[in-house]
Amino acid sequence: MTPDDRATYLKALSAQDLQAFREICISHELSEKEVVEQHVPVINIEMFLFNFPKVCCMHLFPHLHTLMISQQAVTDIQGLEGCPNLEQLWLTENEITDIRGLGQCLQLRRLYLYSNHISCIEGLDNLNNLEVLWLADNKISLIAGLSQLTCLSELNLARNMIEVVGNSLDANKAVQSLNLADNRLGSFKQVWHLASLPNLSQLLFSDPDWGASPIAKLCNYATYAAVNLPNLQVLDSQPLSPQTKAVAEATYLKKKMYYNMRINTLRRKGADLAQQAQQGLQAHLAPLLRGLRKLQYESKAVSCELDAAATAGGLMKGGGQRQQQLREKAQALQLCIDDMLQQGAAKERDLAAACKASDAVTEGLVHRMLMELETGGNIRFEEGKANDQWFASCQQLVQSRWQPPPGGGFAHLSPHPSNTPTVLRLTRVHNRFLRSRLESKLDELKSSGTGGDRHLLEHLFFSGQPADLQRLAEEGFPQPPVQALSNSLTLALEQGIAGRREGGGGGSGGAVHHVLVAKVLTSHCQKARPYAGVAQQAGDPSAGYQAAGGDPRQRWWHVLDNALILPEYIAEVSCKPAAAGDGMPSAQQPPCPLASELPHIAAPLAPFLTLCPAQTPTPPMGTPTLPQQDSPPAQLETDTMRGLVTQEVLLNADAAAALALPPVLLPRHRTYQLSEKGVLEMTGVSMIGMLTQLNLHGSALKKIEASG
């Protein structure tokens, strides 16, 4: 702009903008003439505690390098299009709600927007030269819109509402200093995500000027930050010396070795259980296989008779009727063989499904061990045992909240007391971050006089898929929580069944259900419409409830603040009465030691583990043993052929009837050694070369001599 253009621009200003321009001139000891003529360029403007309600008149300062407007009533970023040389912009402690109007400030290197009301990071895509960005003390809940800032080296997001870092900073490889103090970050996962920043040397989750994030209060926080971020030099304003890093790495390595040993041991024992289940199935199928071999032997003998009858033609006595009987017997035997093969295949499929379920339990336990390692013990899952005091109290809680409905998902169960849900497994959740968050929220409510009484915490239920419940136990419910919780186990289980059906997973009232038991603050609540109509406003209740059906005691709770939900237990519940059996023989042997040691991994394999043959304990060394009176091999062989030595053979009525069908086949002549002379005698031919077919089925051969 020329001086004449600037003079014309001044004359066209509104009274409010003209007053703002005069405030700038007064604060910087400038006259209107000096601004118009611009003999000495104005490169720095600072406005503190002046009456400057908006950014205006910046077109009059085209050479401006630094603009600082603080503690004003500015609500919008505007009027900076005429400042192409602007390098530093301070709009702090104002009333700005969004970021815009910076698209033409391509030379901007330092941008300070802290202590405003910004809720979304946007409008920064063109600032490719930006090196420093301060957005502290705003209302930002999501890190986004920074992928184009490849030169960014310092980022301050302290005192916001950020809960997750994720991969939002992966593109900002140049970041050296990051301040995330006083946010809602409470998981060590956020530290792992920061490992993608190779130049990160200064990290703050706790800052004396801004406050501390919950993660900075967790156990082993500094150790895990030093190990996972090897280039880090300063943590929470404290330098990390090489000695500190060495101690942290040694500590983490010991913990990692310990957990790896536990994981390998668990997987090995799980594989041993699967092998024992396979042995149990083989023991169960052995009589069936012996019966199958008997049927196959008889079927082959019938086939040989049919071949012989076909070769003889009509010379065999009663040939037509006998052949028809042989065909009928062969058909009946084949049907029985196919049926027994299907039975064996079904058992094999059952074992494969049981092994898959057992492996899933094993990998779930492995995941929990890794989670405990990766979070430094701040998230831990404790498997319940019958002698644990908390196990009995939680079991009683779950069973006391059950009331069989007259219809619906469990209509096939009668409301008899014997159908009280069975708690198959209980896992106690230890999540220091979620517990600390709840305690802080209760203290906040109590100090504000709107509730926070710990005596009003109530246990509520939520049913879902195991993976979903595991995630909720680790990360907590989302904000706002979209899941409704119930004080009735019956309602929660019906909700879980409906969810599985909608997701295509099926479900029935007799299946095993997974339930999350959470401690929830239900004070300062009111009767509410369905969740879709519940919205949280300032001063609104912390939760709304709905009565379910005709029983006012059974309620759905819609909690509006996820900080008021603390997952405490994960339960596996069965509402199905104990069945008489599934076709497997009842257990006669005591359970194997591994099954007692790992009951949850062994549970899917239990029908097969009970079939495993009892193992004879090995006598201690030096114990005298009596000689066994064994039969000689030759005598044992003879007895076996004569049927004196027998083993259990499993044949159903149809198989026995098929074997008894006429004609009854006589035992074939046994040939123990095949020689040319024996073949000639057996077939009745004069020369071996005249043979076209030789059937040796059932001849008990042991040796075959060379034949020409």
Image: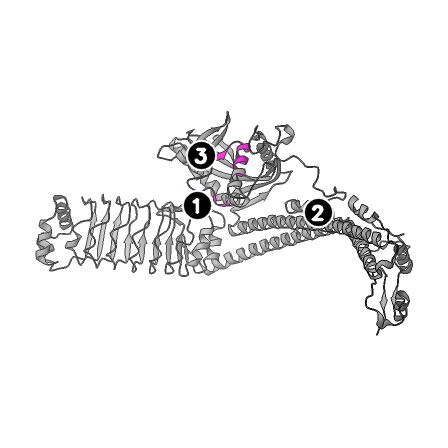
Magenta region, residue range: 474-496
- Could you give the CA–CA distance between mark 3 and mark 2, rounded to whole angstroms? 44 Å
Which amino acid type is shown beneath numbered disc 2?
Phe
Point out the tag, 1 or 3, that comes first from the N-terminus. Answer: 1
Residue 272 relative to residue 505: left or right = right
- The residue closer to the viewer here, 226 or 261, is 261
For the C terminus, which image quadrant? bottom right
Q: Quadrant of residue 510?
A: top right
Q: Can residue 131 be seen at all in this image of the molecule? A: yes
Does dot 2 land on a helix, a strand or a loop? helix
User: Is the residue 537 above or below the residue 253 in the image?
Assistant: above
The residue under label 2 is 608
Which mark is first along the chain, 2 or 3?
Answer: 3
Which disc number belongs to residue 274? none
Q: How is the image coloured?
A: one colour
> Which residue is labeled 1 in the image?
214
- Residue beneath disc 3: 558
Disc 2 to disc 1, C-alpha distance: 48 Å
User: Closer to the camera, 88 or 459?
Assistant: 459
How many residues crowd around disc 2 within 10 Å: few (fewer than 14), some, or many (20 or more)? many
Pair 2/1: label in front? 2
Q: Are marks 1 and 3 in contact (CB under 8 Å)?
A: no
Amino acid found under the numbered disc labelled 3: His
Q: For the point 60% across and 40% down, which residue is it? A: 512
